[in-house]
Image (cartoon, rainbow, N blue to C red):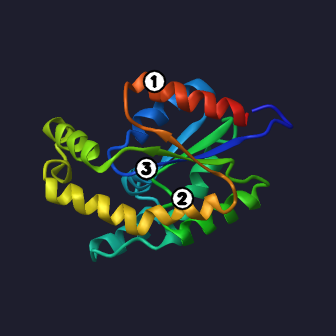
């Protein structure tokens, strides 16, 4: 990252199975961005038994949700560990309005902001089909059961989709079709991100 260069901060958004992880990996390489998924944050902090990992574990062991401030502290650590990338792709975070506000605040402290939320639009039947297919090889129980998949989509719609509206009010939300060939979807994302840089 050159001095004076502006970092690109993206939220890659969409329901489970919309292809966020696959696309984030491709964008990471093309634009020299760092993909940050909450799953990876937790695996790192828990796996290395860091103070934040230990704190998160106390909630997880009781079956409780880890409070946002712990997740945001993990996020802050991750940003500080990678100061030279040209930007960040937030994948799976924020999931709620309070998390969106916390992310905005964290970036503001760094003199940065979210540049765009890009939502991959995929209809429910396609998602169910994709996740059931993924379940055959992923080993994830929640990918193998249609009822569980539909429940995850329903939770996404009620709890997570308001994040889209939150950034839309700031004129930052955009949608692209997440259906079709992986490289076609990637092409649509590339041209959108190139227009932000």
* Vertical position of residue 83 compared to residue 156: above or below: above
Instruction: Looking at the image, tell me whether mark 2 or mark 1 is earlier in sequence order.
Output: 2
Q: In which quarter of the image is residue 103?
A: bottom right
Classed neighbour count for the residue bearing mark 1: other residues with Cα under 10 Å, few (<14), some (14–19), many (≥20): few
Secondary element at tag 1: helix
Q: Where is residue 140 in the image (x, y as percent from the top left)?
A: 19, 47
Q: Can residue 32 be seen in this view?
A: no
Q: Which of 128 and 36 is in front in this view?
A: 128
Q: Is residue 142 left or right of residue 121?
A: left
Residues tagged 3 and 2 counted as in contact (Cβ below 8 A) = no
| Residue sticking out furthest to the right | 4
Residue at the disc numbered 1: 184
The Cα–Cα distance between marks 2 and 1, rounded to whole angstroms, is 23 Å
**Residue 109 picture quarter:** bottom right
Residue, x 22% and y 47% (percent of image)?
128
In front: 53, or 20? Answer: 20
Can you give x and y, in whole percent of width and height, for residue 172 in the image? 66, 52
Name the image quarter holding residue 53.
Answer: bottom left
Q: Earlier in the sequence, mark 3 or mark 1?
A: 3
Give the position of the N terminus as an image quadrant.
top right
Seen at 37% across and 29% down, the residue is 180
The answer to whether any part of residue 171 appears in the image is: yes
Read off the residue under disc 2: 164
Q: Nearer the viewer, residue 19 or 65?
A: 19
Give the alpha-carbon distance from disc 3 to disc 1, as whole Å. Answer: 17 Å
In which quadrant will I find the C terminus? Answer: top right
């Amino acid at each position: 990252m050159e001095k004076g260069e502006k970092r690109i901060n993206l939220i890659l958004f969409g329901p489970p199975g919309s292809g966020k992880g696959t696309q984030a990996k491709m964008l990471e390489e093309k634009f020299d961005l760092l993909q940050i998924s909450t799953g990876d944050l937790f695996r790192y902090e828990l796996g290395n038994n860091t103070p934040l990992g230990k704190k998160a574990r106390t909630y997880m062991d009781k079956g409780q949700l880890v409070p946002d401030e712990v997740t945001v502290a993990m996020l802050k650590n991750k940003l500080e560990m990678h100061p030279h990338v040209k930007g960040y792709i937030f994948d799976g975070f924020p999931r709620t309005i309070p998390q969106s506000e916390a992310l905005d605040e964290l970036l503001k402290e760094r003199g940065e902001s979210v540049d765009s939320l890009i939502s991959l639009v995929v209809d429910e039947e396609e998602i169910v089909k994709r996740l059931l297919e993924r379940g055959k090889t992923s080993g994830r129980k929640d990918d193998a059961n249609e009822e569980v998949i539909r429940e995850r989509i329903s939770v996404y719609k009620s709890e997570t989709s308001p994040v889209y509206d939150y950034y839309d009010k700031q004129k930052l939300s955009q949608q692209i079709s997440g259906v079709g060939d992986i490289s076609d979807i990637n092409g649509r994302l590339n041209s959108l991100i190139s227009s932000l840089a």
